[in-house]
Image: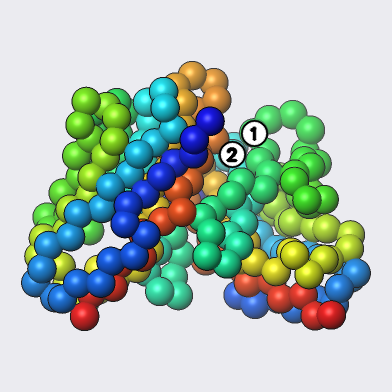
Amino acid sequence: EAGVTQFPSHSVIEKGQTVTLRCDPISGHDNLYWYRRVMGKEIKFLLHFVKESKQDESGMPNNRFLAERTGGTYSTLKVQPAELEDSGVYFCASSQAGFGGYEQYFGPGTRLTVT
Amino acid sequence: AQSVTQLGSHVSVSEGALVLLRCNYSSSVPPYLFWYVQYPNQGLQLLLKYTTGATLVKGINGFEAEFKKSETSFHLTKPSAHMSDAAEYFCAVSFGGYQKVTFGTGTKLQVIP
């Protein structure tokens, strides 16, 4: 069974540009989460999808971040326009519905550098 | 609100020595507790978890953790460190179900030969 995959693994962009990160969850997982780790700080929750619906987006930092989940499958996280403080590692995680939903499986992360 | 405190951002142990990584949490309701590990250039991997039942939980690679409600702690231990254990370890908590996970700041473990 394939794990959670994320693309790209690294992205370097200039301030003001747009970047789109992609996450493919484990097949059949209804729950999809985005997290971010800024250098030297803790991993912080951004938002949670259940299928294609946003269940909790309380962690989204501002309206420069837009997350979508097409058809309840893969998800994208767009940052527009990017700022220096957006640099960090963006993790995606997924979990199944039902009793096992508490166990989140994480992807390898996308390292975003904004210069 | 839930929070997680990991004592020590860097811990060094000698190969073969006991590994002890400390984690305390704050939660108004019984939490689900996790330890994740991130090896260099890899993603987060679940090491072990506590949901309900037995308070001593065993994970992969010889690690275990004990949930102590009275101390609000979930410390991670391994009797004998291996060089391959060098990684960053994260304690985390959730309210269960499909809720978001709240992470500690991480502890980097160095194993000295």
Question: Which disc is residue A72 wearing?
Answer: none
Q: Quadrant of residue B17?
A: bottom right
CA neighbours of label 2 inside 10 A, class few (<14), some (14 to 19), many (20+): many
Q: Nearer the viewer, residue B30 or A44?
A: A44
Quadrant occupied by the C terminus of chain A: bottom left
Could you tell me how many numbered marks the image carries?
2
Q: Nearer the viewer, residue A9 or B65?
A: A9
- Percent from the top left, x then y, of residue B70? 73, 48
- Name the residue carrying label 2: B32
Residue in the image at 57% along x and 67% along y = B40
Residue in the image at 49% along x and 19% along y = A98
**Helix, strand or loop under label 1:** loop
Depicted B43 relative to depicted A33: above or below: below
| Mark 2 / mark 1, whichever is N-terminal | 2
Residue in the image at 48% along x and 46% along y = A106
Chain for disc number 1 = B
**Helix, strand or loop under label 2:** strand
- Percent from the top left, x then y, of residue B105? 52, 66
Q: Quadrant of residue B85?
A: bottom right
- Name the residue carrying label 1: B51
Is residue A42 visible in the rendered image? The answer is: yes
Chain for disc number 2 = B
Q: Residues at badges 2 and 1 in contact (C-beta under 8 Å)?
A: yes
Q: Is residue A74 left or right of residue B84?
A: left
- Amino acid type, residue under disc 2 in the picture: Tyr
Q: Determine if marks 2 and 1 fall on one subunit.
A: yes
Residue in the image at 16% along x and 49% along y = A66
- Percent from the top left, x then y, of residue A9? 37, 59
- Amino acid type, residue under disc 1 in the picture: Thr
Depicted A34 relative to depicted B40: above or below: above
Colour pattern of the rendering: rainbow
